[in-house]
Image (tube, rainbow, N blue to C red):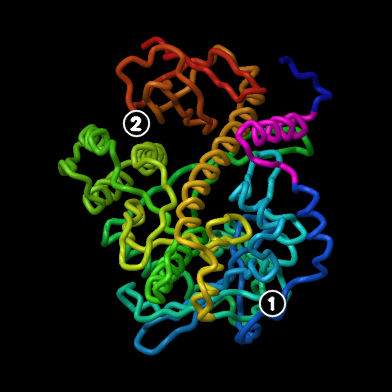
Amino acid sequence: MKYTDDQKHRAILQRIARRAMLERGLSPDFPRPALAELAAIRGPAVRGEGAARDLRSLPWCSIDNDDSRDLDQLTVAEAMPGGAIKVLVAIADVDALVRKFSALDEHARQNTTSVYTVAEMFPMLPAKLSTDFTSLNYAADRLAVVVELVVAEDGSLKNSDLYRAVVSNKAKLAYNSLAAWLEGSGPAPQGLGAVSGLDGNLRLQERAARLLKSLRHEHGALELETIEARPVFDGDELKELRADSRNGAKDIIEDFMIAANGVSARYLAAKGFPSLRRVVRAPKRWDRLRELAAEQGAALPAEPDPKALERFLVTAKAADPARFPDLSLSVIKLLGPGEYAVQLPGETVAGHFGLAVKDYAHSTAPNRRYPDLITQRLLKAAMAGRLLPYANEELAELAKHCTEEEDAAKKVERQVIKSAAALLLGSRIGEEFDAFVTGAGPKGTWVRLLRPPVEGRLASGFEGLDVGRRLRVRLLSTDVERGYIDFRRAEQ
């Protein structure tokens, strides 16, 4: 299909996104019963069952993307005797307003996640909730589930606890500007100076995160650095797909969330409750990971070993930092996808190979992910001494459903980003690009360009190629409607 100048890029991509949602069994719109329930909710929940601590005076802050409005977490730190650091992670109490079996809950259960496409975000919960009543917004009193953990000087957890509290966000901070300030390459973010002591608190949070990360990497957590393509619009016209990489502020949140998710999983186990775990099993394609390492002069053992893989990644990053994101993506593809699994009391399930943790339950984003809302209900029941909100068989069904629907949502997001890339590349048919293989199997061979960072199918010249192989490709065709971008191997 040929697009005329009066067809706005954003509208084209929004239409494609909605169609992709429906094709994969996801609902882009909220049903009438859910909207009727929403209309009856007059404001945020500031009182809940049981006692909630009043922690509004603490210098809480949120750290998220520049454009994020669905704020799931706040963080704060406190220096302790002996060099330890107490970290508090407040998680929005979504269950206080979205009850199990409600129409709002049924819609969230169907999609299981918010779907973030380049043109439009399809929230798991209506914006009135996820960006307002159940969002930990600036200067707003909100109910939360607080995960408390004390980090020792060696990065280990001295102790931890969970409890309910009322909190108030004192500063809404964004990843990029905060990272620049932390690194000394940018000014203090807006609002930082208005909160007494927040600058020092953020430095303390950064130190605690580094301690946690250092210990995880000693245990074999993988140091990976991927580049995501973020759209840049001028009004409704798509101008480019800009590479968006990790930074120090993102690391703080990542390390705190990993720690909080581990505390949540162990808390439920200690209470004799089942839990919904996020697992990444030992990679089936370890043989190809060994080949990738060998191509760079390193050796990995015959059996999957996260510590050995991490040592290789550290060396590879030091040797060629510019190409490390490409290697990271290849490793991620070869590790294989994550899945949800139920851990029953007294039993064990696989841990998370990439994070080198045994206990990991998604719990920190209940506005955006349904498994986190399930975990929140389990945690609240365990804290209050109530009966289980889910039977074991129901949890097993939900684990399978959430894995499938999360996969469907990711495919929608990838399809729309490819449609956006097809819009941008449509005028560049016949040009050559540097690329590397991201997938190779019976369904086809896939490559990702280095610039712009977009993925497409290698239609010819793929014989003998495997994940991680670098090559030169020529753009053959694009199909905006289906998100197809086809290449062939360029002449050597």
Give left or right: position of 320 versus 277.
left
Element class at badge 1: loop
Q: Quadrant of the N terminus?
A: top right
Res 20 → quadrant = top right
Element class at badge 2: loop
**Whole-number angstrom distance, CA of label 2 to CA of label 1:** 48 Å
Query: At x 68% / y 42%, what residue is drawn?
Result: 27
Out of 77 and 402, give the one closest to the viewer.
402
Q: Position of residue 422 (x, y in %)?
A: 62, 24
Instruction: Note whether 146 is above or below 317 in the view shown.
Output: below
Residue 415 in view, yes or no: yes
**Amino acid type for the residue under numbered disc 1:** Ala
Q: Earlier in the sequence, mark 2 or mark 1?
A: 1
Give left or right: position of 26 versus 459.
right
Crowding at label 1, few (<14), some or many (≥20) Cα neighbours within 10 Å? few
Is residue 429 in the magenta section? Answer: no
Residue underneath mark 1: 194
Query: At x 42% / y 19%, what residue is drawn?
Result: 472
Query: At x 15% / y 41%, what residue is drawn?
Result: 302
Query: At x 35% / y 76%, what residue is drawn?
Result: 157
Instruction: Note whether 367 is above or below 385 in the view shown.
Output: above
Range of residues picked out in magenta: 8-29
Q: Position of residue 298 (x, y in %)?
A: 19, 40
Residue underneath mark 2: 468
Is residue 21 in the magenta section? Answer: yes
Q: Position of residue 443 (x, y in %)?
A: 42, 22
**Amino acid type for the residue under numbered disc 2:** Gly
